[in-house]
Image: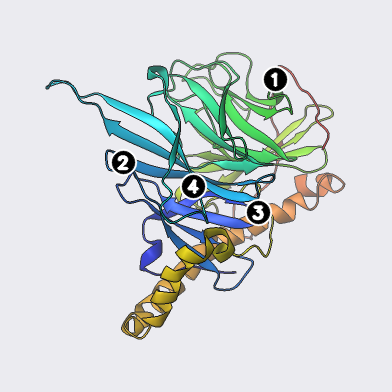
Amino acid sequence: MRALAGVRYLKKKYINTCNGVVLLAGAAKSKHPTCVLWNPAVADDDREVAVPCPSKGFCRILGLGYGPRSKTYKLLLWRRWRLDCEPPKKRYSTELLVYTLGGAAQEQPRSLMVFPARMSGAIIPESLYLDGTIYLLHDCTTSAVIAFDVDDETVATIDMPGERDPDWPWHARSKLMEMSGRLCVATNHGHNRAALWLVTAHRRWEQRCVLGDERDVDDNEEDNGPSADRGMMAGVWDCDGVLAMYLDFRIGDYDKLCLYRVPNGEMFKAELPRDLTPEMEDFALCWGYKPTLVSPGSIVGDELGQDESRRDQMADIMEPLKLANEKDKRKGHEDTLFTVCFMDFVVRIMRRLPDRMQDVLEMPMLSPGDPGFFFEKASFSRIQHIYLTN
């Protein structure tokens, strides 16, 4: 297990991963945005990057991408600034910017598009990079996936599928995920239901399964199915025809782990006690991650790397802070161990699918004093199901 600790990582969150390099950046907008590029497969290999931002407004870093034709790495930025108008009115405009890493020192971010008024809401600050494209989730009064082609520097909008639930302020029931090498997302599908979707090569949506009941469920009516009410899909994995889905319920005593047989539409669920599952805010799943030996230093170029050299030369000044950093690392290891154990538990289940699914369904109790961990068949109504091959 590798860990990062130190002042430069404060208030940094996971954004996305590209060619084995993880992007960490602030979730809040800033006049002077910075980010960290980190390759966890290589010991002590990370670089901090300061991104120039236009003097007017604030910026936020949304994603890292690689253009296979141009062989360049680029950062995608979101900018918001106040328009000049008579008080007391306050009007703002937002746009997407692109910044090429490793370029000339004087290079500035370039504008890609100004968001229309109907897309004035904030973008989810966690993106997905796949095959030369950075995908962003915009979920507000209108819901769409924004696709940025790194080589061509073009932006396309993909409307979100599914039926909005008027009782929910958001349409998406997950962050952007990756399954079988494709963009994947869960959305509302009417009242008390959620659907799982995959995008095709032609950027059309295909439904994989539906969670919840076809009927509307009253607040006082018991529902034995894997209800989508208040639940967010934290992760989904295709285990050769069996979908393993982890549902996070922020309200209640349990999360859920669901197993769905794609060929026949059978659904099984297991309730996961709160003391077994980590909080969603405590971890991030790096969708699309593949370990490489790509060096962050080679991405940012020598000019940006000079700042790192200067910091290394002044290391003696920072010597008194080493003890504090080591303390942070130990605390980080302790906090991380709980999440790692839970993820290892989920991985062990997936490794037994599909051939030993019956063994998984008949798993014994976790411990003699535990009420038991077991899967039960869920009442499940399937609207439509399309099997997609890898």
What residue is shown with label 1? Answer: 381
Above or below residue 313? Residue 378 is above
**Depth-wise, is mark 4 or mark 3 nearer the camera?**
3
Residue 370 located left or right of residue 13:
right
User: Mark 2: which amino acid?
Assistant: Phe
Image position, residue 216 (x, y; %): 55, 14
Q: Camera-side residue: 49 or 107?
A: 107
Q: Are marks 3 and 1 in contact (CB under 8 Å)?
A: no
Q: Identify the residue at horizontal 51%, vertical 45% (top origin).
A: 63
Task: Look at the numbered disc 1 and give the secondary structure of its residue.
Answer: loop
Which three-letter amino acid code belongs to the residue tagged 4?
Met
Secondary element type, mark 2: strand
Q: In percent of the image, x 73 and y 40: which residue is there? A: 181
Q: Quadrant of the C terminus?
A: top right
Report the residue marked by disc 4. Answer: 280
Tell me the number on the disc at residue 58: 2
Residue at the right extreme, as displayed = 355
Between disc 1 and disc 4, whose residue precedes?
4
| Res 145 label | none
The amino acid type of the residue labelled 1 equals Ser
